[in-house]
Image: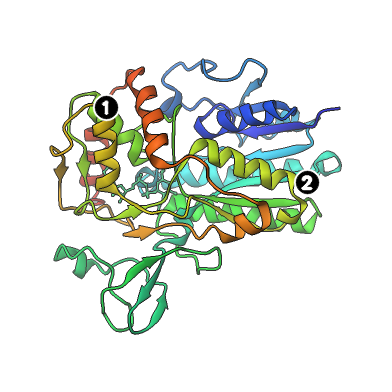
C-alpha cells in the first residue's frame, strides 16, 4: 500500500511542488491549508495549480478538531504551514506567533495523540534563524557577527566588519552549527518550529527532521503578496512597469534555491533514516547579490536592467550575507541542487509573464516606513 502523507500549507508555493513530487513517487497526498487571503487572494478557492490527485482540506492549524481529522490515517506529516512575512511579523507579532508557534503546538498535541500511526515528521525551518551568516576575518579567522550596529548603518556603511577587530570581513558558507541569532519574530517562530518538532519527535520516538530553507524562488510564488521573497517582488514590479526598489546598495547577497530542489531535498530527508533527529541546510551553496538577481530578472523579462531605485536604506533586522554550507545535506542525504539560477530565473520569468499581479510593494514599504522599520 502506498504511504500517506499530509502536508500542512500544502496548497502553497512550496507545499504544492512537494505534493507533486510525492505523487510522482507513489505516495498518497493530502494538503491541509487555510488558503490565507494574503497568499491566495480574497474568497480563495482551490488553486488551479494544485494537482487534482491531492485531497485538499481547508482548515487552520490552530483548530485541533479539524486538524485531528485530517491527520487520522496519515503515515508522514510535513509541516510547512506558516505566516511568512518577515517585515510584517515585526508589527503583527501576536498573529504571527499565534499561527506559527501556537499552530505548531496544536499540531504537535494531535501528533502525540495519534503517534501510533505517524512514522515520520518533517518541518520547514528557515535560514532566517541564523541571522547573519558565517564570515572570515583576515586576522581573527571565522567569526559569527550579530547584526551590523545601527551607528554603522546610519553612516550607510553596508559591509560587515569583524566584531572583534573591526576589519572588513568576507562571507563564508554557513554550516548548521553556526550559533542562531534570529532577528525577526518570524525567525524566532521558525526556530520554535524546529525545536518544538525535534523535541516532541525525540520524546515520543517519532523520527523527525528539520529543513532550513534558504531563499526559495520559482513558479507559484504569490506575486501579489508584498511580503514574499525578493525574486517574486522584483518580477511583480517589473511586470507592472515599475523599477524594482533595491535596499542598501544591492551588494547584499543570498543563496537562491529553486523550489524543485527544495522538494527534492525534503523527499530525500523523509526517505532516509539517517536524517532522523537532524537539521539540514537546503541551499545551493552559491551566493548571488540582490542587484545581480534584479538584473537577471529584468533582462529575462525584456525590461531595463539599469533603471532600479537603489534607495540606500535598510530594513530593520536585514542581514548582509548568508549562504549555505551544504556539506551535511550532501554527505548524509546525497543532496545537490540541480537547477542553476540562470535556468531557474528563465523558468520563473516565463511563468511570471503569464500571470497578472497587483503590485503591493509600495503599500508594504510605506507600512514598514511608518513603523520605523526601514531607515
Ligand atoms: C527572509 C527570511 C527568509 C525567508 C524570506 C522570504 C531572514 C534573514 N530571512 O529572507 O527566511 O524565506 O525572507 O520570506 O529574515 N530586497 C530589496 N528590495 C525588495 C525586497 C527585498 O532590495 O523589494 C532585499 C532585502 O533588503 C534583502 C534581500 O533583498 O537584502 C532579500 O530579501 P527577502 O527576499 O525579503 O528575503 P530575506 O530577508 O533574505
Residue highlighted by disc 1: 301
- Taking the image as shown, residue 12 lies to the left or right of residue 295, namely right
Which comes sooner in the sequence, label 2 or label 1? 2
Q: Quick check: 10 above or below 268? A: above
Q: Is residue 99 visible?
A: yes
Quadrant in which residue 230 is drawn: top left
The quadrant of the picture occupied by the C terminus is bottom left
Q: Residues within 10 Å of mark 1 (few under 14, many from 20)?
A: many
Q: How is the image coloured?
A: rainbow
Q: How crowded is mark 2: few (under 14 residues within 10 Å), some or many (20 or more)?
A: some
Residue drawn at x 45%, y 60% is 182
The quadrant of the picture occupied by the N terminus is top right
- Taking the image as shown, residue 11 lies to the left or right of residue 95, namely right
Quadrant in which residue 348 is drawn: top left
Which one is in front, 63 or 1?
1
Residue drawn at x 46%, y 16% is 43
Q: Give the SS element for disc 1.
A: loop
- CA distance for labels 2 and 1: 49 Å
Residue drawn at x 22%, y 23% is 240
Q: Which of marks 2 and 1 is in front?
A: 1
Total number of numbered labels?
2
Residue drawn at x 76%, y 58% is 202
Residue 135 in the image, given as x and y percentages of width and height? 38, 70
Residue 131 in the image, given as x and y percentages of width and height? 41, 61
Residue highlighted by disc 2: 112
Question: Where residue 79 is drawn, which disc sits there?
Answer: none
Amino acid at each position: 500500500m502506498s504511504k500517506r502523507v499530509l502536508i500542512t500549507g500544502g496548497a502553497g508555493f512550496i507545499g504544492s511542488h512537494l505534493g507533486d513530487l510525492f505523487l510522482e513517487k507513489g505516495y498518497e497526498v493530502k494538503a491541509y491549508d487555510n488558503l490565507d487571503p494574503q497568499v491566495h487572494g480574497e474568497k480563495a478557492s482551490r488553486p488551479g495549480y494544485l494537482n487534482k490527485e491531492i485531497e485538499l482540506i481547508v482548515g487552520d492549524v490552530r483548530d485541533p478538531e479539524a486538524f485531528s481529522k485530517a491527520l487520522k490515517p496519515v503515515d508522514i506529516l510535513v509541516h510547512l504551514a506558516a505566516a511568512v512575512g518577515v517585515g510584517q511579523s515585526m508589527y503583527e507579532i501576536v498573529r504571527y506567533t499565534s499561527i506559527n508557534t501556537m499552530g505548531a503546538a496544536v499540531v504537535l498535541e494531535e501528533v502525540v495523540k495519534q503517534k501510533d500511526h505517524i512514522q515520520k515528521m518533517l518541518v520547514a525551518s528557515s535560514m532566517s534563524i541564523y541571522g547573519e551568516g558565517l564570515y572570515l576575518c583576515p586576522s581573527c579567522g571565522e567569526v559569527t557577527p550579530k547584526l551590523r550596529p545601527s551607528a554603522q548603518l546610519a553612516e550607510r556603511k553596508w559591509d560587515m566588519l569583524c566584531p572583534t577587530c573591526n576589519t572588513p570581513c568576507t562571507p563564508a558558507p554557513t554550516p548548521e552549527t553556526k550559533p542562531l541569532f534570529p532577528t525577526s519574530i518570524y525567525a524566532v517562530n521558525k526556530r520554535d518550529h524546529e525545536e518544538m518538532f525535534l523535541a516532541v519527535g525525540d520524546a515520543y520516538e517519532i523520527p523527525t527532521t528539520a529543513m532550513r530553507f534558504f531563499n526559495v524562488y520559482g513558479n507559484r510564488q504569490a506575486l501579489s503578496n508584498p511580503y514574499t521573497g525578493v525574486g517574486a517582488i522584483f518580477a511583480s514590479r517589473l511586470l507592472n512597469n515599475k523599477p524594482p526598489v533595491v535596499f542598501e546598495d544591492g551588494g547584499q547577497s543570498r543563496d537562491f534555491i529553486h523550489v524543485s530542489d527544495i522538494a527534492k531535498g525534503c523527499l530525500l530527508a523523509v526517505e532516509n533514516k539517517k536524517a532522523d533527529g537532524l537539521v539540514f541546510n537546503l541551499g545551493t551553496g552559491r551566493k548571488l547579490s540582490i542587484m545581480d538577481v534584479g538584473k537577471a530578472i529584468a533582462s529575462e523579462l525584456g525590461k531595463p536592467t539599469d533603471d532600479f531605485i537603489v534607495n540606500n536604506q535598510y530594513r530593520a533586522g536585514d542581514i548582509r550575507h548568508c549562504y549555505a554550507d551544504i556539506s551535511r545535506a550532501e554527505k548524509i542525504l546525497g543532496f545537490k541542487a540541480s537547477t542553476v539560477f540562470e535556468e531557474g530565473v528563465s523558468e520563473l520569468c516565463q511563468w511570471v509573464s503569464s500571470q497578472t499581479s497587483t503590485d503591493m510593494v509600495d503599500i508594504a514599504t510605506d507600512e514598514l516606513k511608518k513603523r520605523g522599520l526601514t531607515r
